[in-house]
Image: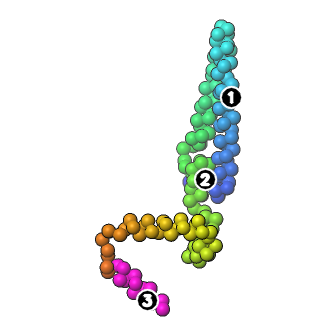
């Protein structure tokens, strides 16, 4: 089956609308609970039953909206389509080696200390681990070819 939404923004907008509607309906449930109790206490069972059924209907619709059970197909669900398109669409910025170097050159002293501390901790964590001479020799030969 074809996707119901063509991108993240479209799917997420519907999901947000459903979420807002579900929260409103949950508020209705909260409002009806004391009314149900009051009607039952006063002996107005018909009114209490009506309000109870309305509250239960809202609980059901909240559950339906939050769980996005519209037809059972993931490609028709705003929530599932949001997750799908978020994974498909590229992130805001590509991380390149040049970008990393530029960030490091503009880092403040606290950021540099933190970064060096992480590198030193990583280096210490592998200090007593087995050393793969063939792999690192091949890596060194690759770096030597640059020059």
Whether residue 134 is visible to the viewer of this picture, yes or no, is yes
Q: Position of residue 133 (x, y in %)?
A: 31, 79
Q: Position of residue 92 (x, y in %)?
A: 64, 65
Which tag is nearer the camera, tag 2 or tag 3?
3
Q: Which residue is mark 1?
A: 28
Residue at left 38%, top 65%?
125
Q: Magenta region, mostly helix, strand or loop?
A: helix
Disc nearer the start of the sequence (2/1)? 1
Q: Is residue 139 magenta?
A: yes
In the rendered image, the quadrant that contains the N terminus is bottom right
Q: Position of residue 33 (x, y in %)?
A: 64, 22
Q: CA distance from mark 2 to mark 1?
A: 27 Å
Q: CA distance from mark 3 to mark 1?
A: 71 Å
Q: Position of residue 70 (x, y in %)?
A: 59, 42
Q: Which residue is mark 2?
A: 82
Q: Secondary structure at mark 1?
A: helix
Q: Is residue 25 magenta?
A: no
Residue at left 59%, top 37%?
64
The image quarter containing residue 43 is top right
Towards the viewer: 37 or 124: 124
In-image side of 20 versus 104 (left or right): right
- Dots 2, 3 in contact, CB < 8 A: no
Residue at left 44%, top 85%?
143
Disc nearer the start of the sequence (2/3)? 2
Please say if 23 is above or below 123: above
Q: Which residue is mark 3?
A: 144
Towards the viewer: 33 or 49: 33
Q: Secondary structure at mark 3?
A: helix
């Amino acid at each position: 089956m074809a996707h119901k939404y063509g991108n993240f923004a479209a799917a997420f907008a519907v999901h947000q609308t459903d979420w807002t509607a579900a929260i409103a309906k949950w508020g209705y449930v909260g409002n009806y609970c004391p009314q149900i109790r009051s009607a039952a206490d006063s002996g107005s069972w018909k009114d209490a039953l009506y309000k109870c059924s309305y509250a239960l209907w809202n609980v059901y619709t909240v559950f339906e909206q939050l769980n996005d059970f519209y037809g059972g197909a993931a490609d028709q669900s705003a929530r599932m389509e949001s997750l799908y398109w978020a994974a498909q669409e590229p992130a805001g910025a590509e991380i390149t080696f040049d970008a990393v170097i530029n960030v490091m050159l503009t880092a403040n002293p606290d950021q540099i200390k933190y970064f060096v501390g992480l590198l030193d901790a990583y280096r210490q964590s592998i200090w007593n681990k087995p050393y793969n001479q063939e792999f690192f020799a091949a890596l060194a030969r690759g770096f030597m070819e640059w020059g």
